[in-house]
Image: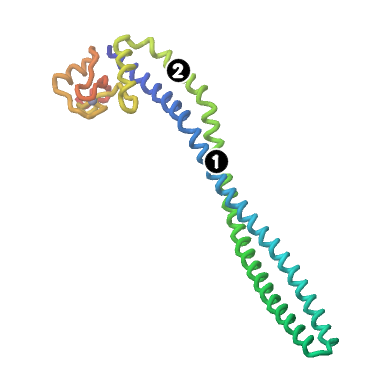
Amino acid sequence: MRESLFKLLELQEIDKEIDILRQSQRDFPSEIEQLQNELKTARDHLDAKQNESEELEKNRRTLERDLDTVNQDLAKHQERLNEITTNREYDALQHEIEALTIRKGELESLILETIESFESITSKLEDDNTYYKEIEKERGELIKELTDKLNSVEKNVKKWEKKHAAIEPNVERRPLSLYNRIRRVVKGGVAVVSVQKNSCGGCFRQLAPQRLVEARRGDTLMRCENCGRIMVWAATEEAAA
Ligand SMILES: [Zn+2]
């Protein structure tokens, strides 16, 4: 029995590794997706800013063309002032010139605003670009790492299963089936524990002296009265006892 119990501890270590690998198969895809989403959000933000700056440039060019037209109109109107003969015509022309001058002022301040907005966006764009490149590299490496691990899960599980299969025949049937049963229901998959400081290594319930003697003999299949785990008398406990 004693040998079986020690082998069970070995088996449990292997099964823990397999559990971790299986858990990663459940966890990694959503972790990868999360990282990809973070990258996409940053990329979208960058693209939006880039578009905004291009839009501002386009607006500025339109405004500048409008301003050119207004300036040309103004020049024409000024010339016509010299050809005018009546007061009525003069007043009408002056009126138009005033309107054009107001429009010119409006266009000039709009152009200035556009230039300021453009400059403020492009100066941030550089930082945004640097930030994006940093996270693209960092998240990209993480994604690759997780994907590689995910792709090798099956291969690694097989490796551990082989080790499991090599040990299993050395465990008596009764402790083995009990181990498998407990493992399915117990938290963290820990079904076998060693006795530590005269207590169950799983729930730390103190063992009665008579049970300690029994555990130390190691010739029976002993379970913790509190948590139900299989108990093994560890070599380190010999020294303490
Ligand atoms: Zn216990």
Which residue does the image show at 79% across and 86% down from the upper left? 89
Q: Amino acid at mark 1?
A: Gln
Q: Looking at the image, is 80 positioned above or below residue 194?
A: below
Graded by Cα atoms within 10 Å as few (under 14), some (14 to 19) or many (20 or more), the crowding at tag 1 reads some
Query: Does residue 3 appear in the picture of this structure?
Result: no
Horizontal relation, residue 206 to residue 16: left or right: left
Q: Earlier in the sequence, mark 1 or mark 2?
A: 1
Inspect the image, locate mark 2, and give the three-letter code of the amino acid beneath it: Glu
Where is residue 223 drawn, in percent x and y? Answer: 23, 19
Q: Where on the picture, by quarter, is residue 104?
A: bottom right
Q: Secondary structure at mark 1?
A: helix
Q: Secondary structure at mark 2?
A: helix
Q: Quadrant of ligand 1?
A: top left
Quarter placement of the C terminus = top left
* Residue 187 percent coordinates (x, y): 31, 27
**Which residue: 50% across, 33% down?**
29
Q: Nearer the viewer, residue 100 or 108?
A: 100
In depth, the one of 32 and 115 nearer the eye is 115
If the image is split into quadrants, where does the N terminus sit? top left
* Residue 161 badge: 2
Place residue 71 in its image quadrant. Answer: bottom right
Q: Which residue is mark 1?
A: 36
Q: Can the viewer see residue 100?
A: yes
Mark nearer the viewer, 1 or 2: 1
